[in-house]
Amino acid sequence: MFSACNSGGDKSQEDHDMDSMSKDTAQATTTDDKDIKAVSVTFTNVDAGISGGIKEIVSHYLHIKNALVNDDSKEAASQGKALAEGMGRLDKSFFTPEQKKIYDGVEEDLKEHAEHIGENAGNIKHQREQFSMMSQYVYDLSKAFGGERPLYHDHCPMYNDNKGAMWLSETKEIKNPYYGDEMLTCGTVEEKIQ
């Protein structure tokens, strides 16, 4: 694991040691992927219609993540709406029964979180709360079906009153969507989904 922030449980340290963050960040960006736990997707033979639909979901999710990294609630809202609409276009008839069970297990909640993000331009705190819950569902989909690209499973230990939260990223470099510019490099790389 690569640490990019002070992950100690000391809540009294509100200023977050920026000097140590810079040193840790340099380490996180120069480490090889071979040091990251690799996770293979469950389903390697997925219908093209399904893989295209999952790719669209992951792509919109990553756009939401990047908008939150950039503290851009309007773009996050736009991509939240696009994600929900994309889910509505997915033809579930191409799923095998085992694949459908996984998708059905996340569909309703994932769509609800995307809609909440879409309806809350200007309320980035609420969008980030929804994104933290959404991330687990996109992680489950990505582990099952892949995202048509390597994805990094990242973790911020400080979000949600030090309970932590995870997110997926298309790059190994930590860019924290929960704090944006406030603590951009806070987090660790946990896994790489291949």
Image: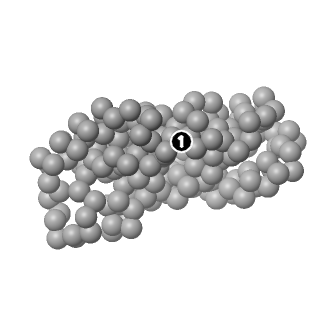
Q: Amino acid at mark 1?
A: Ala
Tag 1 secondary structure: strand
- Please determine whether, in this image, residue 68 is positioned above or below residue 104: above
Residue 67 in picture, x, y percent from top left: 41, 39
Q: Left or right: 135 with respect to 144? A: left
| Residue depicted at x 79% and y 34% | 45
Q: Which quadrant holds residue 14? A: bottom left
Quadrant location of the C terminus in the rendered image: top right
Q: Which quadrant holds residue 33? A: top left
| Residue depicted at x 82% and y 51% | 98
- Please determine whether, in this image, residue 172 is positioned above or below residue 4: above
| Residue depicted at x 49% and y 45% | 37
Q: Which quadrant holds residue 129? A: bottom left
Q: Of all residues shown, which one is farthest toward the front?
A: 34
Residue 76 in picture, x, y percent from top left: 46, 42
Snapshot colouring: one colour
Q: Left or right: 187 with respect to 182? A: right
Residue 61 in picture, x, y percent from top left: 54, 41
Tag 1: Cα neighbours inside 10 Å, few (<14), some, or many (≥20)?
some
| Relative depth, front residue between 192 and 166 | 192
Q: Of all residues shown, which one is farthest toward the left?
A: 19
Query: Is residue 84 visible in the rendered structure shown here?
Result: no
Residue denoted by label 1: 38
